[in-house]
Amino acid sequence: MAGLLAWPVNAALESGVYQTLPGVTVEERGDRVPSGSRVVPISATVTFDLGAAPPSLAAFIPNAALEGGDPFALTVRSSYGAQLMDGTYYFRGDYMQEIYPSGTQYGFEWRFSSTNGAVVWNGNTGWSGRTETVAARPV
């Protein structure tokens, strides 16, 4: 995932509410995605509390994508946040926690940085589970 968030021209990312710019897209890849990958539009309202210990993020995504399915509304909250040495903010958590409160294996790892007055959003959202193959043995 990569995108830009709108915010008044500043030198650094600050606590507050940000909105993705029109035309932002994400590339979705996976076994369940038709043809293996697709590019879909995304819009989000992202709220940062960078003064919290640890920093936190909440994002409302009205057209979230997952597994090649239809877009759906989703609120995503970080379970961990930190400011890295280069000033970038790093957040991770369970992508589907709001829908499945007991937790899922769909996680996100997103980074937000400020470059030339624009906030840049990069990261990954994906399934972190394992599939095991069990072979039957004669007894």
Image (cartoon, grey):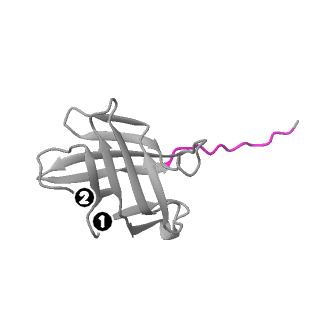
**Front-lying residue, 36 or 135:** 36
- Quarter holding residue 25: bottom left
Labelled disc at residue 118: none
Residue, disc 2: 4
- Quarter holding residue 135: top right
| Relative image position of residue 27 (x, y in whole percent) | 38, 62
Compared with 75, 52 (above or below) is: above
As drawn, which residue projects farthest toward the top? Answer: 53
Q: Is residue 129 magenta?
A: yes
- Prevailing SS of the magenta stretch: loop
Residue type, label 2? Leu
Give left or right: position of 137 versus 82: right
Give left or right: position of 118 versus 112: left
Q: Is residue 38 magenta?
A: no
Residue drawn at the location 47% of the way across and 57% of the way down: 74
Give left or right: position of 120 versus 116: right
Element type at marker 2?
A: strand
Segment colored magenta:
127-138
| Relative image position of residue 7 (x, y in whole percent) | 19, 56
Compared with 138, 3 (above or below) is: below
**Front-lying residue, 123 or 36:** 123
**Residue 14 seen in this snapshot:** yes
**Front-lying residue, 121 or 35:** 121
Residue type, label 1? Val
Pointers 2 and 1 in contact (C-beta within 8 Å):
yes
Q: Residues within 10 Å of mark 2 (few under 14, many from 20)?
A: many
Residue drawn at the location 65% of the way across and 43% of the way down: 132
Residue, disc 1: 24
How far is mark 2 from mark 1, CA to CA?
7 Å
Residue drawn at the location 59% of the way across and 48% of the way down: 100
| Relative image position of residue 48 (x, y in whole percent) | 30, 44
**Residue 1 seen in this snapshot:** no
